[in-house]
Image (cartoon, rainbow, N blue to C red):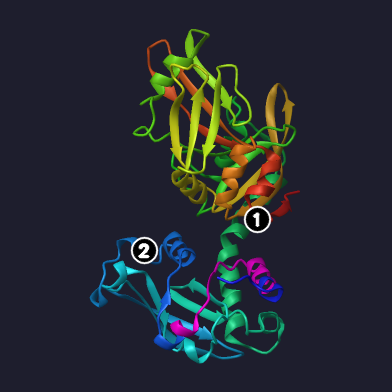
Amino acid sequence: MRTLTELEQRKIRVLTENHVSLTLIQPTETGLKKSILDATGSIRNFLRENQIHDYDIQLQGPENKACYKAKIYHDFTLSNSNATLYRPNTKKGDTRIWFSGLAKYTVPNDIVAIIHFDHVFHLFNLTQLNIENLLRTNIYNPFQELIAEISLKNTEVASELLAMLRKVAISGPIPSMVSADTSVGRTLEAVLGIKINSSKQPDFKGIELKSFRGSRTNRKNLFAQVPDWNLSKFKSSAEILDAFGYVRNQDIKLYCTVSAINRNSQGLSLRLDSDIKQVIENSNNSEIGDFMIWTLDKLHNRLQEKHKETFWVEAESTFMNGKEHFQYTLVEHTKKPISSQFDLLIEQGLITLDHLIKKNSAGRVIEKGPLFKIKSKGLALLFPPSEKHKLI
């Protein structure tokens, strides 16, 4: 795809501010004449990540093509269209896409934006359409209505959760439900009526809830993810504990942080290998060497799954009558982490790994991680610009 002009980039920023997710395609002269366009990698990823269509499992041939409703937007009008997604029998089944009627409203090398909303593809010529005027005008138009509906749908759950948090904050300091580092989050979930569970899914209607004590500079939990045991030298948490654990209060433990920029006291460090797309944990013990492996694809998927939309809730911690209380004060609302930045932040030591393994006196091995955590200053690098809301 060609480089976007400053005007095209500005139009995309306006749509992003309205919570619109989209992908882009650049029709060529040949593509418009033959009514056939390549479904590029960015389009395929957009369709797959939004659970619209997966070319990887689509069979070749016209009998296996997939058809969807579509609409094409113009100045103050729209026209109905049909989307066809298929893989021909020729050329190894290259991925193809076409929208009927597109050639009437597009010239070669225009940039066309594709939105998927309410089970329909919505297209508009990003190069030609005066988006800002259509969104500002008092004259009714279908494009303005579409963007308003998308914005409302994408913010209604966040607005609901924000209102609940403000109600909690107004009630004043809340006594901790448990005595633990995790109590700030568990207490908030309890008062919100969110059941505590070990699910990998977000906490509240698609929004992940992460709480932390504002007086600390602690790293924030991103997600837990075990390594790929098939690729790793060690095949269980028990083996890791046997190799690097230490005795504490009659338990054998391995509670430590592992970083890519230095080795910890157990001689452990992380390494990013971009060529083979892996994060590798290494020991300075030459007999062990590399012993744990995570694939970047898996880590990126976990990041997108867990933090598609997140509320990072800050709390002031105070002690009253010997018991910790939390006053929840601020929310930072993030969306759609940038997967490629995750790799950079691993290399820079802003994202680290925590082992939380222990064997109790009964011989049972318990693993609470491994946890991937991010330093506070890394949030602005991993996520697009966030929104902050004071609760009181």
Q: Residues within 10 Å of mark 2 (few under 14, many from 20)?
A: some
The mark found on residue 54 in the picture is: 2
Query: What amino acid type is highlighted by mark number 2?
Result: Asp
Occupied quadrant, residue 140: bottom right
* Element under disc 1: loop
Give the number of marks. 2
Left/right placement of residue 32 relative to residue 190 reads: left
Residue 108 or residue 320, whichever sits in front: 108
Occupied quadrant, residue 149: bottom right
Q: Which residues are magenta?
A: 10-31
Name above or below for residue 243 compared with residue 202: above
- Identified at 56% across, 22% down, the residue is 256
Question: Where is residue 316 shown, x and y percent of the image?
Answer: 73, 36
Residue 352 inside the magenta-drawn segment: no
Q: Quadrant of the N terminus?
A: bottom right
Residue 55 or residue 203, whichever sits in front: 55
Name above or below for residue 150 compared with residue 268: below
Residue 11 inside the magenta-drawn segment: yes
Left/right placement of residue 212 relative to residue 115 reads: right
- Identified at 34% across, 34% down, the residue is 230
* Element under disc 2: loop
Question: Where is residue 6 shown, x and y percent of the image?
Answer: 71, 72
Name above or below for residue 306 compared with residue 316: below
The mark found on residue 230 in the picture is: none
- Residue found at the far left of this picture: 63
Is residue 101 visible to us here? yes
Q: Which residue is mark 1?
A: 384
Q: Residues within 10 Å of mark 1 (few under 14, many from 20)?
A: some
Sequence-first disc among 1 and 2: 2
